Image (cartoon, helix red, strand yellow):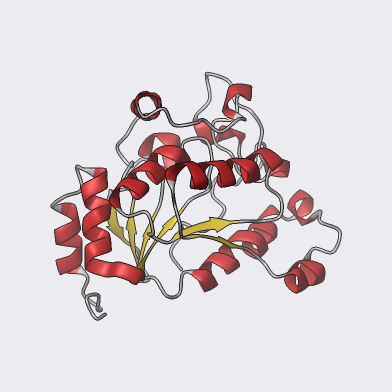
């Protein structure tokens, strides 16, 4: 399929024309791009809503889950529960190879002294390889999650030419919670314990009502993103 080229303007215009309706946006993107489109999901605190939209648009749309080897057990159980409950039939777990982990993180403690290197090993590099077949990736990022995401658009082109679709970019936490409740979507079990943004277990803590959702990620470090959403 040659629908995307060095000039993505036409595709971006078609997607932006329907961006106010998440399901229509995803359905249009899938119709335009087919197997050149994939969804990234952390199966985290608010992931069920985006995945419900995906299931409504096209249940066999490819969904990529980064299985870093450091997830909470609750996240892995939730990944299975949610995929089965929504009827998602094309979820693929991706992550580093055992050989890479053995060579670069033999003790499993890389996160403690070099979290950037840990994210590179367990997230950035596996996603870079897994996303090669895809011209467009769908994410669950929202503007309200953190200051670093405050200017994101629903449809955006990265510096490397890849298109990212963020159907929930303008949705507030309250809007998402209300729609999840309306759809009777199961919450991630750790949300009840104060985890509002859920990543790898060693680098995630609960947050209180005075912090943004991502304050519990890499707490105390000069780090706010793992690197998968930064253009190469």
Left or right of residue 132, residue 2 in this image: left
Residue 98 pos. (x, y %): 75, 69
**x, y (%) of residue 123?**
60, 60
Q: Is residue 141 visible?
A: no
Task: Say above or below: 42 vs 89.
Answer: above
* Residue found 69% across the figure and 53% down from its top: 115
Q: Residue furthest top?
A: 209
Which quarter shows the N terminus? bottom left
**Can residue 39 be seen in the rendering of this structure?**
yes
The vertical placement of 61 against 128, above or below, is above
In the rendered image, residue 102, in percent from the top left (x then y), is placed at 81, 69
* 199 vs 83, nearest the viewer: 83
Q: Residue at x 77, y 49 (%)?
A: 112
Q: In the picture provided, is 209 more to the left or to the right than 169?
A: right
Q: Is residue 120 left or right of residue 84?
A: right
Residue 192 image offset from top left, x and y in percent: 59, 22
Classify residue 94 by image quadrant: bottom right
Q: Quadrant of residue 51?
A: top left
Q: Nearer the viewer, residue 100 or 214?
A: 100
Question: Relative to residue 199, is residue 45 depicted above or below?
Answer: above
Rendered residue at 22%/76% (across/down): 3
The residue sitting at the bottom extreme is 2
Instruction: Give the residue at the far right of this rendering.
Output: 107
In-image side of 113 versus 178 (left or right): right
Question: How many numbered discs?
Answer: 0
| Residue in the image at 76% along x and 66% along y | 101
């Amino acid at each position: 399929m040659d629908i995307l080229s060095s000039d993505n303007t036409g595709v971006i215009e078609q997607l932006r024309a329907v961006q106010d309706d998440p399901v229509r946006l995803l359905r249009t993107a899938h119709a335009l791009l087919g197997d050149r489109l994939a969804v990234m999901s952390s199966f985290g605190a608010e992931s069920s809503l985006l995945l419900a939209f995906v299931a409504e648009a096209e249940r066999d749309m490819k969904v990529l889950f980064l299985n870093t080897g450091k997830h909470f057990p609750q996240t892995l159980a939730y990944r299975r529960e949610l995929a089965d409950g929504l009827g998602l039939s094309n979820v693929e777990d991706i992550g580093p190879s055992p050989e890479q982990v053995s060579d670069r993180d033999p003790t499993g403690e890389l996160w403690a002294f070099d979290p950037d290197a840990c994210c590179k090993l367990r997230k950035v590099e596996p996603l870079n390889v897994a996303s090669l077949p895809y011209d467009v990736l769908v994410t669950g990022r929202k503007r309200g999650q953190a200051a670093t995401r405050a200017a994101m658009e629903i449809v955006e082109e990265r510096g490397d030419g890849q298109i990212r679709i963020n159907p929930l970019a303008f949705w507030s936490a309250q809007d998402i919670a209300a729609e999840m409740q309306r759809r009777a979507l199961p919450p991630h079990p750790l949300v009840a314990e104060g985890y509002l943004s859920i990543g790898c277990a060693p680098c995630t803590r609960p947050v209180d009502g005075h912090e943004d959702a991502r304050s519990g990620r890499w707490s105390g470090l000069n780090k706010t993103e793992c690197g998968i959403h930064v253009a190469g």
